[in-house]
Image (cartoon, rainbow, N blue to C red):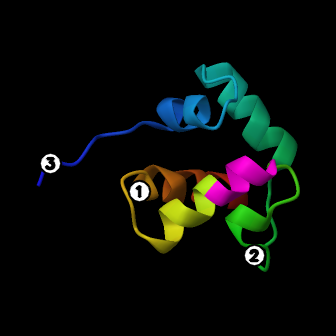
Amino acid sequence: MEYSQHSINHLFAQLGLPSDDTSIDCFITAHGPLPAEVPLEHAPFWSRAQAAFLQVEILEDADWAEVVDMLNLRLRA
């Protein structure tokens, strides 16, 4: 089975957000730190579609799961 290698830039593009490094850093600064008790997909700054995508990727340990985990860690730092 072949797995895709996604980057955080690709994840932001998939979520419909600006995906350059500066925009990603600004997003993380503006929305972090995310409290430990709030699951990533329940954060108030996601649209319904974004939250649903993140939830599926996390629950199914799907193709994007590794980079979603990276985003989760960066938002909690």
Magenta span: 47-52
Residue positioned 22% across, 48% down in the render? 3
x 51%, y 67%: residue: 58
**Rendered image: mark on residue 47:** none
Task: Using the image, determine if residue 28 lies above or below residue 69.
Answer: above
Q: Residues within 10 Å of mark 2 (few under 14, many from 20)?
A: few
Q: Alpha carbon of mark 3 to alpha carbon of mark 1: how far?
A: 15 Å
In the rendered image, is residue 77 in sight? no
CA gap, disc 2 and disc 3: 33 Å
Q: Quadrant of the N terminus?
A: bottom left
Q: Which residue is mark 1?
A: 66
At label 1, the amino acid type is Glu
The tag earlier along the polypeptide, 2 or 3, is 3
Residue pointed to by mark 3: 2
Q: Quadrant of the C terminus?
A: bottom right
Give residue 57's position: percent from left, percent from top. 49, 60
Residue 44 seen in the current view: yes
- The residue singled out by tag 2 in the image is 36
Give the SS element for disc 1. Answer: helix
Dot 3: few (<14), some (14–19), or many (≥20) neighbours within 10 Å? few
Residue at the image point whose x is 43% and y is 36% from the top: 7
Which mark sits nearer the N-terminus, 3 or 1?
Answer: 3
**Main structural element of the magenta stretch: helix, strand or loop?**
helix
Judge from the rendering whether residue 43 lies leftward or rightward of residue 60; answer left or right: right
The residue closer to the viewer here, 32 or 51, is: 51
In percent of width and height, residue 25 lies at 69, 32
Please, what is the three-letter code of the amino acid marked with disc 2? Answer: Ala
Q: State the image coordinates of residue 72 (x, y, percent, origin top left).
A: 61, 59
Q: Residue at x 66, y 58 (%)?
A: 52
CB contact under 8 Å: marks 3 and 1: no
Decide: marks 2, 3 in contact (CB < 8 A)? no
Amino acid of disc 3: Glu
